[in-house]
Amino acid sequence: MTSKLRRLTLCAAMATLFAAPLAMTQSIAHADEPLKIGFLVKMPEQAWFINEQKAATALGQKQGFSVVNIGTPDGEKVLAAIDNLGAQGAKGFVICAPDVRLGPAIEARAKRYSMKFVTVDDQLVDSSGKPLGDVPHLGMSAFKIGNQVGQAISDEMKRRGWNPDEVGAIRISDYELPTAKLRTDGATQTLLASGFKKDNIFDAPQKTTDDEGGFNAASPVFAKHPNIKKWVIFALNEETVIGGVRASEQLHIPSADVIGVGINGAGEAFAELQRKEPTGFYGTIAVSSTNHGKQSTENLVDWIKTGKQPPADTQTTGKLMTRDNWKQVRDELGI
Ligand code: GLA
């Protein structure tokens, strides 16, 4: 062994010697602290996710554990957040990841700190695109909620006396996110079953699942079909649909000729449903973001405390919220 190599080996051995007691002191130091968990969301500015994190924090205050809320809009931020939680002695986290294909990377990083985790809203997948079966998940019953969107649109078309042959649909989509595809597939199925013309449904792929993403996706599609005078808009969430509605306004399509129906029932839809100016945003299928935040957190904390693994896949339901009933639905769902 050269002297350089010997020195290196010695250094490594000493590092291990010092690091081990340090790690032990760390875990002992964390031992009598109250339980700490993380709540990581892909879009911390979106009302849906704000509500979820608020509900998680409120549950923690009630039950005596603390919640570290972190916004993780990309993969690097997710991994850094898990490292950060690990260093703070957190025992687990709830996550809605910015990209569901981060599944294996998130699993590996959580394992490094022996942290348990559950997913909310967007279910993680493995490298072949299959859901990670061993990670408990809570999310919307996506296809059925999509069906409700399609039903609301076709009911409103009938009420307005629209001839389906003259109506175009903008399907703002993100097919890399399975829950998004299921939601828009559900809406499509119901629209077709109620007589909508297949050829009149136009795809508008979105880059981001927010207003801006919806606006940018919808604008060129409207512009390409100036002959179509009446439009319906649907997507994975209300933010995206509102973006699409704004795009229709930009092109001076009268709001009476637009029916947009979203999904979520969080802050943005309330604002839009109370707008004094006319809007093509007709309604949204409201789901309780409060319940998503609370239930997923409860599942994780019970798992940490009792060792009992939460259900593999919990699916939640929704209710149509319009100008007429938004207050009542909001109260019912505790949003
Ligand atoms: C996805 C969407 C969010 C919200 C949740 C609800 O993550 O991006 O806007 O709809 O699903 O499950």
Image (cartoon, rainbow, N blue to C red):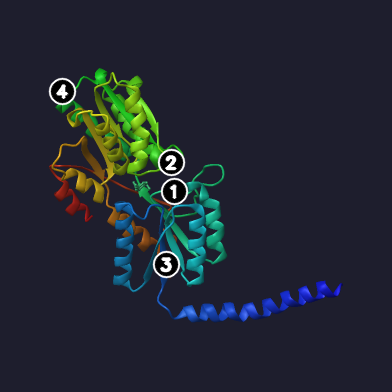
Give x and y (percent) for residue 7.
79, 76
Give x and y (percent) for residue 118.
44, 57
> Which residue is situated farthest in the right direction here?
1
| Amino acid type of the residue tagged 4 in the rendering | Gly
For the residue pair 80 and 109, the one nearer the viewer reads as: 80
148 to 231, vertically: above or below: below
Q: Is residue 208 visible?
A: yes
| C-alpha gap between disc 4 and disc 2 | 34 Å
| Amino acid type of the residue tagged 3 in the rendering | Ile
If you read the primary sequence from the N terminus, does the residue marked by circle 1 or circle 4 appear first?
1
Give x and y (percent) for residue 151.
24, 32
Instruction: Report the residue marked by disc 1.
Output: 123
Instruction: Report the residue marked by disc 4.
Output: 161
How many residues crowd around disc 1 within 10 Å: few (fewer than 14), some, or many (20 or more)? many
**Which of the 4 image quadrants contains residue 170?**
top left
If you read the primary sequence from the N terminus, does the residue marked by circle 1 or circle 3 appear first?
3
Instruction: Report the residue marked by disc 2.
Output: 178
Identify which residue is drawn at 51% across, 47% down.
101
